[in-house]
Amino acid sequence: MKKATCLLLLTAALFSCSTPTYVTNFWKTDATPTKTYKSIFIAALVNNVNAKSAIENNLANAAVARGYKAVKSIDVFPPNFTKENPSDKSAMLNKIQQQGCDAIFTVTLLDKESETRYVPGSGRYAPYPRYGWYGSFWGYYSYWSPMMYDPGYYTTDKTYVIESNVYDAQTESLLFSIQSSTMNPNSVDDFSKSYTAAMVKELEKQGLLKN
């Protein structure tokens, strides 16, 4: 196979995002590839239409930049599937294959974590004995009392944990899976660019994406 993952190269603009995304886990099948993948169906499984569109657009642009055909799910299926209105498996797979796609790339939000932390106005936290002034009351008091007039603030960090899978469109077998983490994205577009950049970097690292 031409490495189903070769569909994700970013253009230079995609690497200008300010929010970093980190790959935390990677898995790929041990099965020997039996065909070359040339067309990818991209499906962001998120309930926010703007986020879905941004993610699929950036991934599709990366695929097209590499000479691959990319089909976005938002252009094929209306975003109205729910537990009460589930999609039909046969109809969906048939539609994907009718688009000429031989691989399916899915993006799913596994978790969104929020953590509130205190940011001091100056100084930093570290346990004794690294900083000697922790060792006595007066040392501690004399160090921190001037900072009482330099107030800090509370902030909430948001971390988004994403899982990305590629399946064979005919057999439905999983070809590879990547888990990634993004903290405090500035916007949906910023997140999608950061995410796509991280995918490209990881796939190059794994030897699954040609330069």
Image (tube, helix red, strand yellow):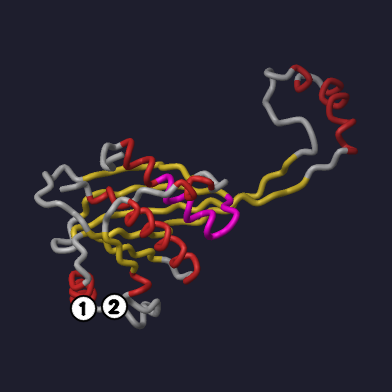
Crowd around label 1: few <14 · some 14–19 · many ≥20 (10 Å): few
Please tell me which residue is depicted at 53% across the width and 51% down the height of the picture: 159
Location of residue 69 with respect to 149 vertically, above or below: below
Which label was assigned to residue 42?
Answer: none
Identify residue type, mark 1.
Ala
Residue 188 lies left or right of residue 55; in this view the side is right
Crowd around label 2: few <14 · some 14–19 · many ≥20 (10 Å): few
Range drawn in magenta: 184-198
Please name whichever residue, 70 or 128, is drawn nearer the observer in this view of the structure: 70
Residue 109, picture quadrant: bottom left
- Secondary structure of residue under mark 1: helix
Residue 39, picture quadrant: bottom left
Location of residue 140 with respect to 91 vertically, above or below: above
Location of residue 196 with respect to 99 vertically, above or below: above
Work out which residue is located at the far bottom of the displayed protein and give it.
85
User: What is the C-alpha distance between the residues marked 1 and 2?
Assistant: 8 Å
Task: Say if mark 1 contacts mark 2, CB within 8 Å.
Answer: yes
- Secondary structure of residue under mark 2: loop
Q: Main secondary structure of the magenta part?
A: helix
Viewer-nearest of labels 1 and 2? 1
Residue at which label 2 appears: 87
Please name whichever residue, 24 or 83, is drawn nearer the observer in this view of the structure: 24
Please tell me which residue is depicted at 58% across the width and 58% down the height of the picture: 187
Please tell me which residue is depicted at 68% across the width and 27% down the height of the picture: 126
Residue 186, picture quadrant: bottom right
Identify residue type, mark 2.
Ser
Residue at which label 1 appears: 91
Magenta-colored stretch includes residue 188: yes
* Quadrant location of the C terminus in the rendered image: top left
Please tell me which residue is depicted at 11% across the width and 44% down the height of the picture: 32
